[in-house]
Image: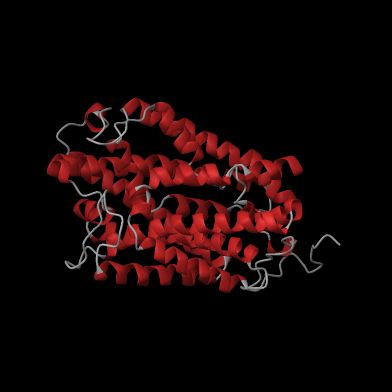
Amino acid sequence: MNGRSAMPSDHPPTPADEFEHERVPDRALKGPGSFWGMYAGEHTAGTEFMIGPLFVAYGVGAGDLICGLLLGNLAAVLTWRHLTTPIAMRLRVTLYHKLESICGRRLATLYNFANGLLFCFLAGAMVTVSATAVGVPFPDVRMPGFSDIMPTGAAWSALVLAIGAAMTWVAVKGYGVVARVANYAAPWMFLVFVACALVTLPKLESHELSAIWTGVPLEGKPKIGFWGVFFFAWFCNAAMHLGMSDLSVLRYARNASSGWAPAAGMFLGHCIAWICASLLYACQLQKFGAGASVAPGPMVYDAVGVAGLICIVIAGWTTANPTIYRAGLAFQGVMPHVSRQAATITAGIVCTIAGLFPAFAMKLLDFVGIYGMVLAPVGAIIVVDN
């Protein structure tokens, strides 16, 4: 019994049918359009407004930044296309289901718990970023800075709880709804990132690239160069491609061309959007010096107004939604008798609690490095088994 359905291929799955413990049947496979929008939306995210400024703060030179981003993101796309996608299409099961069949229940449970928890922390950073946008019109909301770890007040906490609840609701609806939200939002979000850059450029005292990315880190920050940018761009999503977490998404791919879809996220989000966000922070440094705000909401509002705030909120949603969805699948691997919806709600609660603490967003470069190192080696087990 291979788990494939005898139903006709045009018979759609029910909204709650996510095939957590079986192969995805032919009737549920999706074309490339379902993946290009999702990856563009997921990786053109609110957190890009956090990562871009860090390249300025860490003293990356202009040449190192551009070359590192182009080559590092290319390496990530090739990994998704030629490693993750073929395995996902051959197996048609979630990473968690496959890992349990290889390693047994105990090791799979340990991995699923770590994977789900780290996904929740990552989604929590998206909630934090969205809250910095929603909080701009409210003077009682104190925006977090680089050094903030704990929640910055009751108003901040209320915003985070509301945003986390909304994101969880979308993720509970399943992969189909997650993909549709991303498809609707991705093109507009990218245009807002570009608009931020175009509006900011005339405000800069110098348009020389070396005056924006000076190669000199801010006081107290480490310096990184080409190799730091290259490996960060390649491995910041290592858990998803090398670590095979995206088996859970790409198992729906009808053909291998869907494996190129991450290019939309890598080059629009992890290349152009990071550069645009760097420009925003460079402008803030020029105006306010060492006291410049790194909170995405105030930075973007200063550049493009309300449209920028809406962009940040939706960008946070389109990244957090699939991340909470993945975390829910991971937690269901720990609690197999719990429904996917209940596991996703659990993931959303953990994500929202994490979002209360700005440290996950402010230390995003460090966190993503740890995240990839912890989860990526599991992909080697899947590759060897296949």
In this rendering, position of residue 178 left or right of residue 10: left
- Furthest toward the right, the residue is 1
- Identify the coloring: secondary structure
At a point 25% along the width and 62% down the height, the residue shown is: 152
Quadrant for residue 222, please give it: top left
Q: Note whether 176 is above or below 146 in the view shown.
A: below
Can you give x and y, in whole percent of width and height, for residue 357 in the image? 34, 59
In this rendering, position of residue 169 left or right of residue 328: left
Q: Note whether 364 is above or below 333 in the view shown.
A: above
Can you give x and y, in whole percent of width and height, for residue 162 in the image? 36, 72
Total numbered labels placed on residues in the image: 0
Q: Nearer the viewer, residue 104 or 82?
A: 104
In this rendering, position of residue 173 left or right of residue 136: right
Residue 252 visible, this angle:
no
In the picture, the quarter occupied by the C terminus is top right
Can you give x and y, in whole percent of width and height, for residue 233 in the image? 46, 37
Q: Nearer the viewer, residue 145 or 317?
A: 145
At a point 51% along the width and 59% down the height, the residue shown is: 322
Can you give x and y, in whole percent of width and height, for residue 139 in the image? 16, 66
Q: Note whether 244 is above or below 354 in the view shown.
A: above
Quadrant for residue 132, please give it: bottom left
Q: Nearer the viewer, residue 267 or 213?
A: 213
Q: Nearer the viewer, residue 297 or 58?
A: 58
Residue 107 visible, this angle:
yes
At a point 21% along the width and 62% down the height, the residue shown is: 142
At a point 48% along the width and 62% down the height, the residue shown is: 321
In this rendering, position of residue 77 left or right of residue 136: right
In the picture, the quarter occupied by the N terminus is bottom right
Q: Note whether 286 is above or below 294 in the view shown.
A: above
